[in-house]
Amino acid sequence: MDQILIVEDDNPINQLLYEALGKEGYCCEQAFSGTEAKRLLAQEEYVLILLDLMLPGIFGEKLLTDIRKTSQVPVIVLTAKDQIDEKVDVLKSGADDYITKPFDIKEVLARIEVQLRRRNKELPRQVLSYRNMTLDRNTFQITVNQTVLPKITKQEFSILELLLKHPGKVYSKEEIFEYAWEEMFMGETKTLDVHISNIRKKIKKVTDEEYIETVWGIGYRLQN
């Protein structure tokens, strides 16, 4: 599950953020020092970091610099500094936003929502998964039970990509054809049906599980 890392040495503030974000449905981890945060960052990937600057162990500024060497994860800095030059320095160091203490929790939630919405627009998911199937856009590979499906064509890849985006959704043959072939559907379904059949055969080579369900009169979806 996507997680937010809260890095704040003030226990009451850390707990306030943790509980408020939890009520909004976010999954969070807590760090109370820069050293602890660095250890967690080496073990996990986070969708956003709330970062206090005045931390024991590793200072927040140093931690931010280290984060930016390897990651573009959104970072919102929590700071008691309210001078404009100090805020500019924080942004130049790689922070995506800053919030001055004391803060209103509603503002924090709003700033988080903005950063996550921006991140989701800029970084489309490169790996899609459903049950034991994984599709990786980076490698153009589809695996089932950790076995790569053999000789997947561009259209077969695109068909599974669309189905994996929303596993419970029934896609019409028109929707699937236009997505996979990137051209207007003219009412002929044989080409799509043949590709669906070929995908099923390739899945069958690595597992007895059924993945694609035919919804008669409509189209296809991933099987529950």
Image: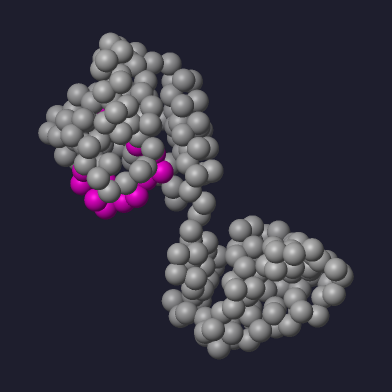
Residue drawn at (81%, 66%), measured in percent from left and top? 185
What is the quadrant of residue 13 in the picture? top left
Residue drawn at (12%, 33%), measured in percent from left and top? 57
Q: Is residue 164 above or below residue 84?
A: below
The spot of residue 32 in percent (x, y) is 23, 33
The spot of residue 77 in percent (x, y) is 32, 27
Is residue 50 highlighted in magenta?
yes
Q: Is residue 28 visible?
A: no
Q: Which residues are magenta?
A: 38-52
The spot of residue 38 in percent (x, y) is 21, 43
What is the quadrant of residue 84 in the picture? top left
- 189 or 110, nearer to the observer: 189
What is the quadrant of residue 216 in the picture? bottom right
Q: Quadrant of the C terminus?
A: bottom right
Residue situated furthest front in the rendering = 183
- 217 or 118, nearer to the observer: 118
- 77 or 157, nearer to the observer: 157
Q: Is residue 177 above or below residue 88?
A: below
Is residue 165 highlighted in magenta?
no
The spot of residue 107 in percent (x, y) is 46, 20
